[in-house]
Image (spheres, helix red, strand yellow):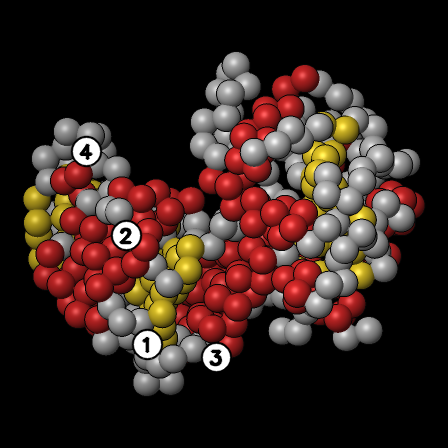
Amino acid sequence: MQVIRFADLCAQGAVKGKRVFIRADLNVPQDDAGRITEDTRIRASVPAIQMALQAGAAVMVTSHLGRPTEGEFKPEDSLAPVAQRLGELLGREVPLVQNWVDGVQVAPGQVVLLENCRLNKGEKKNDEQLARKMAALCDIYVNDAFGTAHRAEGTTYGIAQFAPVASAGPLLAAEIDAITKALANPKRPLVAIVAGSKVSTKLTILQSLADKVDQLIVGGGIANTFMLAAGLPIGKSLAEPDLVDQAEAVMAAMKARGADVPIPTDVVVATEFKADAKATVKAAADVGPDDMILDIGPDTAARLAAQLMKAGTIVWNGPVGVFEFDQFAGGTKAIAEAIAASPAFSIAGGGDTLAAIAKYGIEKDVGYISTGGGAFLEVLEGKTLPAFEILARRAAG
C-alpha cells in the first residue's frame, strides 16, 4: 500500500516551519480520580511528535478519550492528565487548548495538545464542514492512530480528504508494513491462531483466513465449536452448536487447499469455572457430560508448538485457554513460548493477546505487536480500513 510517510517528509526537509496536525491515539485507561493507570499509547505517540518538533514544525496533537457526548464538555472527558504525562515524556510543557476548531496559536518548535476531538459536534459522523475547518488548521496532516483506523471520523478520515498533505505517522506506517508482511506477502507456511469465546464474533475472520493461511489454529470457545463439528464431546463447555455448519465450512475450505484446522487431541477440563477449580487432563474423546474444557492439553500444545517452530509467518489473535487461571494457562504459555522461539515473522494483536504476551514476557520476541484491537481484527477480516484507504488515495493524487 502506497502512502505518504511523515518520516520521508521530515527527511526531505518539507516540514520545517509547517503547521503539522497529528491525530494520535491517547485513549488511555484512568482510575476514578482521573489518574492514568497505563500509558503505553502515550509513549507510543512520542516518536511522531518528536519527529515533527525536530523537523522544525508547529505541532498540534489531538486524540479522543473515552466516549464523551459531542458538544458537552465534562471534566472527566478532558485530555488534561494526558497533557501532563505527555509533557513529562517530552521534557517540556504541553499546553492543552480548548475550543480549537476555529484556530490554534502555535509556533514552529512548539507543541500543543488539542482537547478531546470527540467533543466536537460532527466528529463521529465525519461532518464535512468540521473536517474542512480542521484541515484549514494545518499544512500537513499526520494519522498516527492505528487503533481508530477502522473508523471514518472527522480526525481520522475527513481532515485527510481536505488537508494540503495527508500522511502516515511512524506508528501507522509500521502497522501497514507489518500487516503487509504478514498477510499480503507472507513467508510460508502462514499460520494463524484465532481464539476467543465465540465463533460468531470472529466468523468473518475465520472465513477470510481460510482462503489465505496454511494452518488455522483455533482456541478457546471457538475450538469447542470446531470440536463439535469434528464429532467430539464437549460436555458443558462454552460453544455455539448452531454454528457447527459454519465451522465445517471453514474446515472444508482449508482442506480443499491442502491446509488444515488442527483439532485438539487432549484438553484440560474442570467441573466448575473458578480460580481454584481442579484441572484434569483428558483425551478429547473422553470429555464427560459435566466437564468444561478450559484449555488445550499438553499433547495438543506440544504438537501446535512444533508446527509454529516450522512456520514462516504467524498471526496471533487470542489466548487458547483461560490463561488468567494458572492451572488452565499451559496451552497459552506453550503457544507464546513457541512464537517467541520460532524463526517466523510474528504479528500479534488484541487486548487478551497483549495481556498474555506481557504475562509470559515475550514482548521482545514477537515480530510486531499491533496497537489496535478492532482495527487489527478488521484487517484480519480482509477489510480495507478507512484511514488506510484515504491516505492511499491522497498519495495517489
Q: Earlier in the sequence, mark 4 or mark 2?
A: 4
Residue 282 numbered mark, or none: none
Q: Earlier in the sequence, mark 2 or mark 1?
A: 1
Q: CA distance from mark 2 to mark 3?
A: 25 Å
Residue 299 lies in quadrant: bottom left
* Residue 178, image x, y percentages: 48, 66
Residue picked out by circle 1? 312
Q: Nearer the viewer, mark 4 or mark 3?
A: 3
Q: Nearer the viewer, mark 2 or mark 1?
A: 2
Q: From the viewer's perspective, tell me whether residue 183 is left or right of residue 188.
A: right
Q: CA distance from mark 2 to mark 1?
A: 18 Å
Specify the amino acid type for callout 1: Gly
> What secondary structure is found at the residue carrying circle 4?
loop
Residue picked out by circle 3? 185
Q: Residues within 10 Å of mark 2 (few under 14, many from 20)?
A: some
Q: Earlier in the sequence, mark 4 or mark 3?
A: 3
> What secondary structure is found at the residue carrying circle 3?
loop
Q: CA distance from mark 4 to mark 3?
A: 44 Å
Name the residue nearer the viewer: 103 or 251. Answer: 103
Q: CA distance from mark 4 to mark 1?
A: 39 Å
> What secondary structure is found at the residue carrying circle 1?
loop
Q: Is residue 91 visible?
A: yes
Residue 26 lies in quadrant: top right
Residue picked out by circle 2? 362
